[in-house]
Amino acid sequence: MRPDFRTAFVRQSAGLRQYPALVLNADYRPLCYYPLSLWSWQEAVKASYLDRVDILARYDQVVRSPQIEIRIPSVVVLRDYVKLQSRVAFTRFNLFLRDEFRCQYCGASDDLTFDHVLPRSKGGLTSWENVVAACSPCNLRKAAKSLEISGMQLLKPAHKPDAAQLHNLGRKFPPNFMHESWLDFLYWDAELEE
C-alpha cells in the first residue's frame, strides 16, 4: 500500500504540519485515533490561554510575543469531558476503515473503490450492510453480478460498525508522524515489558 494512501482521505490544515498537539479527552484518551485528534500549535496555545485544556507535554521549540515566551504544547487534555458521537456516518472513509483498507474479495490494499454486494441494478441498497471496499480488478470481475453468479466470496460480511469498533480499528493505523511525548497516551493499554 502506498504510504500516503490512507492519509489522502484525511484533510489537514497547514497548521498541523508543524508541531501538532495531540488532543486527549478528559479521560486521557484521544478523541479519535484515525484520523488522530490533533490541533495546530496555535489552537493548543489558545485553548490553554482560555483554560480549556491542561498541557501535559511540550516541544522544545518556543513561540514568542512581546510579553511572553511559550514552549509549544505537544499533548493537551481537555478539562471538560466530550461525549463521543455514537452514530457512525456512512462515508467512503469510514467504509474503508471498517474494511481495514483492504479489498473484501481478495485482500488487496491498492486501487480501492467500493462495491455493492447485491448490485443496485438488482435492487441492492447503498448501505453499510451492502457495500464493501473492493479493488478495481475485483470490482470489474464481479460487475453487476451477485456473489453466487460471480463465484466470489467476501472475506467478512458487510455490517454496520459502531463508533467503538471504528475507534479501535483506527488504532491499527498509526500516523506517519508521532512525537515521542504522544506514545504513552496512544498505546496506554499496550502490554508492558517485563
Image (cartoon, helix red, strand yellow):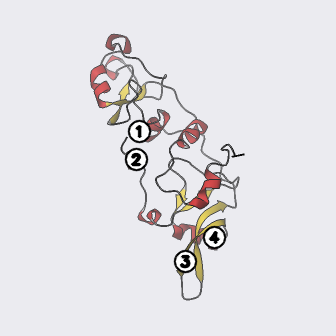
Image location of residue 91, percent across then percent down: 44, 39
Which residue in the protein does label 4 denote?
48
Q: Residues within 10 Å of mark 2 (few under 14, many from 20)?
A: few
- Circle 3: residue type: Val
Q: Check disc 1: other Cα within 10 Å, few if <14, some if 14-19, many if 20+.
A: some
Q: Earlier in the sequence, mark 1 or mark 2?
A: 2
Front in this rendered view, residue 154 or 58: 58
Q: Amino acid at mark 2?
A: Phe
Mark 1 residue element: helix
Which of marks 4 and 1 precedes in the sequence?
4
Quarter holding residue 43: bottom right
The residue to which callout 3 is attached is 62
Between 16 and 190, the residue placed more toward the observer is: 190
- Coordinates of residue 97 in the picture (x, y in percent): 47, 38
Q: Image height check: is 165 above or below 4?
A: above
Task: Please tell me which of labels 3 and 4 falls first in the chain.
Answer: 4
**Rendered residue at 37%/11% (across/down):** 148
Distance CA(mark 2)–CA(mark 3): 31 Å
- Badge 3 element: strand
